Image: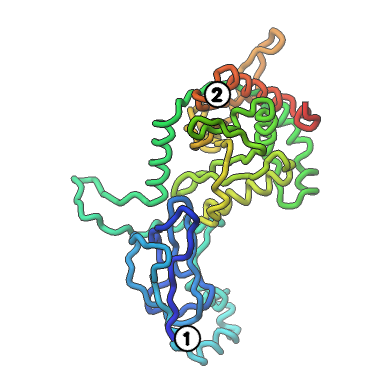
Amino acid sequence: MTVEIKVPVLGESLKQATVMRWLKQSGQYVQAGDAVLELETDKVTLDVPAPAAGTLTHELAEGTDVEVGQVIALIDEQAAPPVSEAVEEQQEKPSAEQNVTDHGSSASSDHEDAPVVNGGTAFSQSAPELPDDGHEGTAGERRVPMSRLRQTIARNLKAAQNSAAILTTFNEIDMSAVKALRSQYRDLFEKKHEGARLGFMSFFARAVVGALKDFPVLNARIEGNEIVYQDHVNLGIAVGTERGLVVPVLRKAETLGFAELERRIADYGRRARKGGLALKELEGGSFTITNGGIFGSLLSTPILNAPQSGVLGMHAIQDRPVARDGQVVIRPMMYVALSYDHRLVDGREAVSFLVRLKELIEDPRRLLLDI
């Protein structure tokens, strides 16, 4: 019996995808549940599993655009596995000599055809060869088509610049108190909250939630001639991957404590880098935080994630001389930037938001006491 592999339902608004990479070759025997190819949509990449065991047949080249419901491969269930009983027996009962001279060979051969994951991200492998677009560049040039995700990023960023009146305001934050708090309680925190590491992002997430309570217009959006205010803070956390920037959303972030924030942020980061995010996890954000500091950025002007009205840019922490009580002291300082839609948010509200954020980070006890 022949079983069809079709392009799965991708989401309400997504009808097309691109064959990004075949994980199994045509003519190869696959097991039910094996990932056979990666599809790239406008927002996410996803693995398509084999619905049954058998020999795989496919003809579509990598880079081909496909439609939801389209047949992209076939599986012949009647085909026998290519491994002989003798080879199977040898794999199950390796000799002592094999164990010494080829340590782990039998285990590795069992997974020879599985997608290689290096350091938790399948994207650490070399990039797949892209189809020739038929154009020759001048000497020293090469042309490759933009990925569907990169095209979407470019389109959305340009649309945000064209539709919103984006303005950026800046401030700087003394990180001494947060660093001291982390140093004092990090071990106890991580021991009590398994799987959660006490980083800086959870402090900023909590501080943003607190500041948005005082300035809810930054958590709102414009639709036509109306302002839509949000009852909850659905906080987007920008994650840079090898394929582009994605922004998974922490829904109802105001209900999350430090430990849960840290767990979810770390989980989103891991899955974003290996293309494991679901479409629903990227939708519905009301405000975004982006941290260019992890790449060494000292200052930047982030672009809005439309239709949101605000995005906070974090940056590298750098020891700098500052004045305190008439004395010059060295403190760990971070520049922060708030880009906002000036059609909706006035300068007074934007500047006051950053001042409130600064107060909460420089005295994190306020985060615990909600003051």
Q: Which x, y percent locates residue 130?
A: 32, 58
Q: Quadrant of residue 227?
A: top right
Q: Which x, y percent locates residue 336?
A: 57, 26
Query: From the viewer's perspective, is 66 left or right of 96?
Result: left
Q: Give the residue drawn at x 53%, y 53%.
A: 279
- Do the residues bearing badges 1 and 2 touch, measured as CB atoms within 8 Å? no
Q: Which x, y percent locates residue 256?
A: 72, 43
Callout 1, which amino acid? Pro
In the rendered image, the quadrant that contains the C terminus is: top right
Q: Quadrant of residue 162?
A: top left
How many numbered markers are drawn? 2
Q: Give the residue drawn at x 38%, y 77%.
A: 57
- Residue lying furthest front: 225
Cα distance, mark 1 to mark 2?
64 Å
Q: Is residue 368 visible?
A: yes
Callout 2, which amino acid? Val
Identify the residue position indicated by label 1 in the image.
Answer: 81
Identify the element where label 1 is drawn: loop
Q: Give the residue drawn at x 39%, y 51%.
A: 148
Q: Give the residue drawn at x 71%, y 52%.
A: 195
Q: If you read the primary sequence from the N terminus, does the residue marked by circle 1 or circle 2 appear first? A: 1
Q: Quadrant of residue 180?
A: top right
Closer-to-camera residue (161/88): 161
Q: Which x, y percent locates residue 128?
A: 37, 59
In the rendered image, the quadrant that contains the N terminus is: bottom left
Q: Say the numbered circle drawn on residue 345.
A: 2
- Residue lying furthest bottom: 86
The answer to whether 90 is drawn above or below residue 368 in the figure is below
Query: From the viewer's perspective, is 33 left or right of 21?
Result: right
